[in-house]
Image: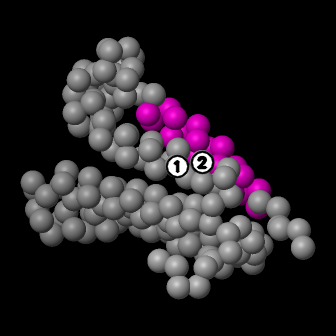
Amino acid sequence: MQSPERPILITVGMYASGAFGALCLLALPLAAIGIGQYSIDEEQVSPNDFLIHAGPIFAIIGGILVVISFAIASRKEWSRSLMMIFWLATTASAATRTFVQINAVSREAAVIAALFASCPSLIAVAVAWWYLYRKPNVVAYYASLEPRESGAV
């Protein structure tokens, strides 16, 4: 029996993840050697400030995206779990960033703002979960990738 073809949206995600991840990672050495202009929250910052404040998140997100791209290209079943981790991490990042920015004014306002800021991301998480774990052709594709060994950890 021939395995199902990779769904088109998974293929698009593979290329987009690889390209965006590579750009995130490329920004880090460019900033380290002072090439380019950098901003955080639409405010111009020095390359050093960019590395200090945004560098870690660029490294984490860029790394996750490159690994996602590799996993999809290599037909790894765990790629969809990693995609869900990415969507959950970006949701947590949006909520945390908003909370930290507003917490100086009011903790209650910060919690409400963080919840509202994460709403679009939560919708994306729900859609990604449905697509990756409930859409029949995607489920069939992932089921065909790696046979699960019983008792494997």
**What secondary structure do most residues of the magenta stretch adopt?**
helix
Q: Mark 1: give few (<14), some (14-19) or many (20+) Cα within 10 Å.
A: some
- Residue 2 located left or right of residue 123: right
Which residue is at the front of the view, 38 or 11?
11
Residue 148: horizontal and vertical position, in percent?
63, 77
Does the segment drawn in magenta span residue 16?
yes
Residue depicted at x 56% and y 72%: 129
Residue 117 showing in the rendered view: no
- Residue 22 located left or right of residue 1: left
Residue that mark 1 sits on: 67
Looking at the rendered image, the quarter that the N terminus falls into is bottom right
Q: Which residues are magenta?
A: 7-25
Residue 130 showing in the rendered view: yes
Q: Amino acid at mark 2?
A: Phe
Residue depicted at x 13% and y 58%: 103
Residue placed furthest toward the bottom: 151
Element at badge 1?
helix
Q: Are marks 1 and 2 in contact (CB under 8 Å)?
A: yes
Residue depicted at x 32% and y 29%: 39
Does the segment drawn in magenta span residue 21?
yes
Residue that mark 2 sits on: 70
The quarter holding residue 104 reads bottom left
Residue depicted at x 52% and y 79%: 152
